[in-house]
Amino acid sequence: MNTIDITKVQAESQAEEVAEMTQISGSKAVMEALLAEGVDTIFGYPGGAIMPIYDALYDYTDRLKHILVRHEQGGIHAAQGYARTSGRTGVVFATSGPGATNLVTGLADAMIDSNPIVCITGQVFAHLLGTDAFQETDVINITTPVTKWNYQVTDANEIPMALAKAFYIARTGRPGPVLIDITKNAQFQLFDYAGYTPCHHIRSYRPKPIIRKEYIERAAELINNAKKPFVLFGQGVILGKAEKEFKDFIEKAGLPAGWTIMGLSALPTDHPLNVGMLGMHGNYAPNVMTNSCDVLIAVGMRFDDRVTGRLDKYAKQAKIIHLDIDPAEIDKNVKTTVPVWGDCKETLPLLTSLIAENKHEEWLAEFRKLEQEEIKQVIHPELNPTSDEMTMGEVLRLLNELTDDDAVITTDVGQHQMVACRYARFKQSKSNVTSGGLGTMGFGLPAAIGAWYGAPDRTVVAIIGDGGIQMTIQELGTIMQFGAKVKILILNNQFLGMVRQWQQMFHDKRYSFVNITSPDYVTVAQGYHIPGKQVCKREDLKDALKEMLDHDGSYLLEVMVTKENNVFPMVPQGSSVSEIRLK
Amino acid sequence: MEKQEYTITLYTENTIGMINRISIIFSRRKINIESLNTSPSEAEGIHRFTIVINETEEVVRKLCRQIEKQVEVLKAYYNTNDELIWQEQALFKVSTDVVAEKAPIERLLREYGAHAVVIRSDYTVFETAGHREEIDKLTAALAEYNLIEFVRGARIAIIKDSEGFHRKLKEFEQSEPAQEVVENEFLNKQDKVFTM
């Protein structure tokens, strides 16, 4: 009897093994998909509804690095930082219910700033959908407005295709966040796995519009006849990996170029045609000259209201050429004379080949003249203050000096963000990571963690205000556990400075709840085993910055800056860009 | 620009959540949808949305671009009423006694081309189809004769100069994997188009 039983058991187990050769779980299919898509880093947080996926991950930790964040919002901001410095797709895991809703801010941020992100959320068992099950939320409907695409998987057979589509949609065309919600039964479910096939075509999806020859020709003609051409560039240049093509374009015709904060670092700061930052707190010359140029060439930017100021007084004298991959951006805010649809990596060389060589020296000199005015009135006093108190600008000046203009800088949102974007100097692209469209406070620290994983060989400095750091300070725990070498530079003015500035200027100095207190950041960091220092005096600043940069590992430096400093220049809300105020 | 009635016609994939993805594009901008109909289209596997809104042409054009940007939308068209053949259907329930006794009702129904769908001893259901104004007028008239229940369907519309979606769908599907799918009026004019 015994022998017969054993034979039977052996036969059964052999049959099971054969079956296992062709059948895998939905969770394992997720891991295989990630590997096939070249994913190396995941930012995530486990929970009940995503446990089978985490169980599968347990066997893949040699190939997939998982960074356990301290909050799902931190996870998605980290994935955004990773995407921005690496140029690759960021991946996030989160569980159902609160795990998924905590992603929403990051999804909205990634949507408006066009970051390629794939979020995988767990969901309750399919048979429990709609029953108000434990940790159930309607994630698909909650995230629909803030995702480029989302999809709920309830059957493991759908997983390879859903993920292939997710990665394809996230990274192609105008990139954006995609969310795949997988019910727990589908994660457990064994199914016949036929391998992973990447997606290259979806019939209803056109990532790039076709390039129209006659529009390129008309654009070239306008540029060739222009006396005062002016180029505005945005993140499209970085997303299109078209930095070189862009440089060739502006160099051939000697076109002055101003940038949006999302386009920052696409063109080196010291490039002779780089005339500075556009918009509300941008530089004087590019804002004023927007209303003096005769041809305005917008490359991969979307005329955000913070860039244009009052629209009915924006570049009305100019012919507008708009290069964009997203047809919905053409004419959305600013009426275009010639639309150049397409990927700027392809359209720019075509345009360059048709434009005549030129210098536009006198025109460029007009920019430089205005720049001198700004240097005298704003930049010099900000970078070289004479008062006892330190300014944010001088911290940036020293940071540039000590990093040889070559750090990755992430910022949070507020005054320090504007100061950092105005004064940070860059040599290479993909070096500026900021929350441009959504203006998400709390973005800076987690984004820096991701930025470091995306570019681990570079110096990553997170410049954050005393308000923003307190929104996602828990991510110090992530740094502590996984060792991202992030330099945290808190510029503490003991206020929610940007709101205070507006209250001062537009609300009769009625400082309503902008006075924010801070914990002892150095002690907090110490609690997370991150060394740190606070600097209150100018004479200690340079050495402290040097110590922060030289330290092999994460470091927190808090710089106490002057309390009631305002960011200038400024285009007040409702004003035209040429009405920019220097004080 | 004046606001007027526009009919938006969409060709989409038939996937769960499409109505939400489309409708939030309107509600986000605080635009009311006057009528929305979804149905299969002339092309197999492709769904057709017919949406009526009151807006300026500029707003409608931008809305269509935002809608077309959605991954699962193939094409968005917008038309004014004179570019369309359109119908709305309506059902009316009135008391059979009233119909039998009140002569004007019969005249009304004849005038509006309504016909009876169900006749019972207690009530009669009439059906008609036409432009909204006609249905509104009939509804107002019947309201005086104890209109028990009334329902009007969403607008359905045929675009006068549309050649349908069969050929376009083929073009969408034609692209071999790895080639970018492109679709605009220059699709068949390759000589005017750069290829990289």
Image (cartoon, rainbow, N blue to C red):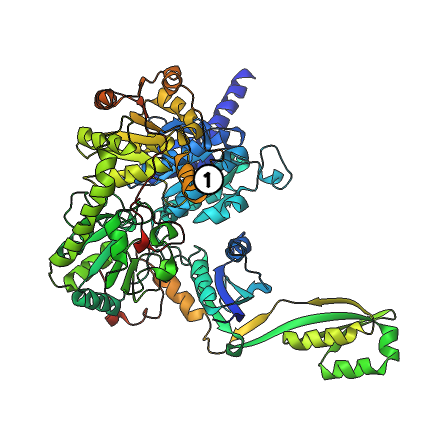
Percent of width and height locating residue A572: 37, 49
Q: Residues within 10 Å of mark 1 (few under 14, many from 20)?
A: some
Left or right: residue A259 versus residue A136 is left
- The one of A203 and A559 positioned closer to us in this rendering: A559
Q: Percent from the top left, x then y, of residue B65?
A: 42, 61
- Mark 1 residue element: helix
- Residue A538 versus residue B95 in the image, above or below: above
- Residue A28 visible in this rendered orientation of the protein: no
Q: Which residue is mark 1?
A: A105
Is residue A4 visible in the rendered structure shown here?
yes
- Residue A301 drawn above or below residue A122: below
- The residue positioned 29% from the left and 53% from the top of the image is A300
Placement of the C terminus of chain A among the 4 image quadrants: top left
Say what amino acid the circle numbered 1 marks. Answer: Thr
Q: Quadrant of the N terminus of chain A?
A: top right
* Viewer-nearest residue: B171 or A170: A170
